[in-house]
Amino acid sequence: MAVDKEELKAKVLAFATKKAASKSKMYIKDLYKADEAASPREVKNAANELVKEGKLEFFSSGSTVMYGVPGFGKTLEGAFEEK
Amino acid sequence: MSVKKHDTPMCDELKKGAWPSFVDDVEVCGLAGKQECLDVLGQLEMSYRHKETHWKHGGIVGVFGYGGGVIGRYSDVPEKFPSIAHFHTLRINQTSSKFYSSNYLRKICDIWDHRGSGMTNFHGSTGDMVLMGTKSDQLEPIFFDFTHQLNTDFGGSGSNLRTPACCIGQSRCEWSCLDTEAICYDLTQTYQDELHRPAFPYKFKFKVSGCPNDCVAAIARSDCSIIGTWKDNIRIDQAAVKAYIGGELKPNAGAHSGRNWGAFDIQKEVIDLCPTKCMWMECGELKIDNRECTRCMHCINVMPVALRPGIETGASILLGAKAPILDGAQISSLVIPFIAMEAPYDKFKDFVASLWDWWMEEGKNRERFGELMQRQSIQELLRRTGLKAIPQMVKEPRSNPYVFWREDEVEGGWKRDVAAFRKRHAA
């Protein structure tokens, strides 16, 4: 059964924010646990919409793309810039 | 513009060989006014001295809304080489079959000279155009210029679908059994979301070759290889076969003519080399047992005027090729011997959806599709995709004596009437 998109986005954001306190960068697979009833594709679409809205952000390890919550852990550029 | 050239004795050694050196090219670009290029050589010299890289990798993933297309790269010695403190790489979606006009290429170079280092890397092991070296604040303007001036998009990187690639196909190749460009373009358009935003445990590549010569190395490099083939018989022109035997036509279309190999010997150079031994001469005519042909293309390559692929064409689909990162290199496994590839390719796309559903659900982080197939078995692949087993899927005799049946494969399932059983069998 298709999951309500806005409801799923709220669940993904809440899950990611809670998790970000201990682990600031997450694989998409980690986010699947936000709602076990939703399909991986639905979670992926919800997470990507949250990125467009600026509530989540992408972070690249170099070969894999991860998700982060703005304000938690290193920022996109901050991880690499010399202070 | 004044630039500073670093002292690079080890890099300079590379200019002395017989072949053109990248050091020359980078230096020419640098001395023409690009400090970034000279700093790249300076940092490379330092890496040669220290025997370790001075690049950091990651961070930036794309322009707004994109989770791919940009590979973040930063110098870890920016105080020594400030012009390359940021030196991001861009992947640009290449045209199908990589056909360009010189006008288009000039515009790319103009944009890149203006907003980047001027260094490019065209079509190496990746299908994309690769533009090397720009700063974070230039990414959005470059994206705007590419999309608005050239109608060109960024390609895929990271855990995304990578930019689909194809050979020249029917546009120029008489052997092509597929319109590879149409398929490549359709897949690119259909899967825009997967191409630009991370969707998978790791990268996923489609490559489309028009015939089994496989000029884009789909069988070796792509998670899903689409390789043109034919269902009917190889077309034979017996008069042309005689012309090859008589020496009027040159084998291999005149290739390998740098030395004298002697007269063409059809038995030695074609028939004896057929991997399934399905060819023979009879009464001066070449015969082929097409049922045994494995589409190796050797005979067609040697005698292209005499032999041509059949006319009932489509594709073979193979899955799981990869380079050696985690579990070693792997070549694709044949899973669909023949599928008609006609637009809008619905049957193929349904099949792809079943692959991705399985991989997204069961794939481990950074696990390629081929590794999932290895870990969970071909049997599981068949179950998830609804394909039927074929002999080509059997790689070796079974080493595992156990067969596990699923409940839906057993008549009556796992349920049984214990009371009725006990009437027949004492406890």
Image (tube, helix red, strand yellow):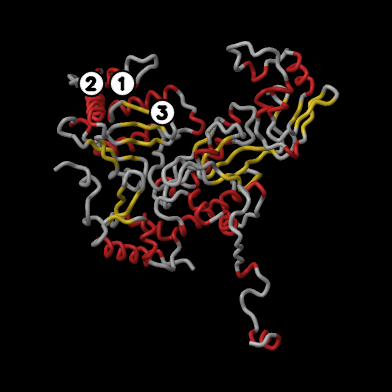
Q: Mark 1 to mark 2: distance in Å?
A: 10 Å
Residue extending farthest to the right is B283
- Place residue A38 in its image quadrant: bottom left
Query: Could you say where residue B151 lies in the image, as x and y percent from the top left?
Result: 41, 35
Mark linked to residue B8 = 2
As displayed, is residue B23 above or below residue B331? Answer: above
Asked whether the residues under the numbered discs 2 and 3 touch, taking CB atoms below 8 Å apart as contact, a structural biologist would say no
User: Which residue lies under the disc numbered 1?
Assistant: B23
Query: Split into 4 quadrants, where in the image is the C terminus of chain A?
Result: top left
Asked whether the residues under the numbered discs 3 and 1 touch, taking CB atoms below 8 Å apart as contact, a structural biologist would say no
Q: Mark 2 to mark 3: distance in Å?
A: 26 Å
Q: For the residue carrying disc 2, how many other residues have a C-alpha within 10 Å: few (<14), some (14-19), or many (20+)?
A: some
Question: Tag 2, which secondary structure?
Answer: loop
Residue at coordinates 46% horizontally, 26% vertically from top-left? Answer: B100
Mark linked to residue B318 = none
Question: Tag 3, which secondary structure?
Answer: strand
Q: Nearer the viewer, residue B51 or A78?
A: B51
User: Which residue lies under the disc numbered 3?
Assistant: B122
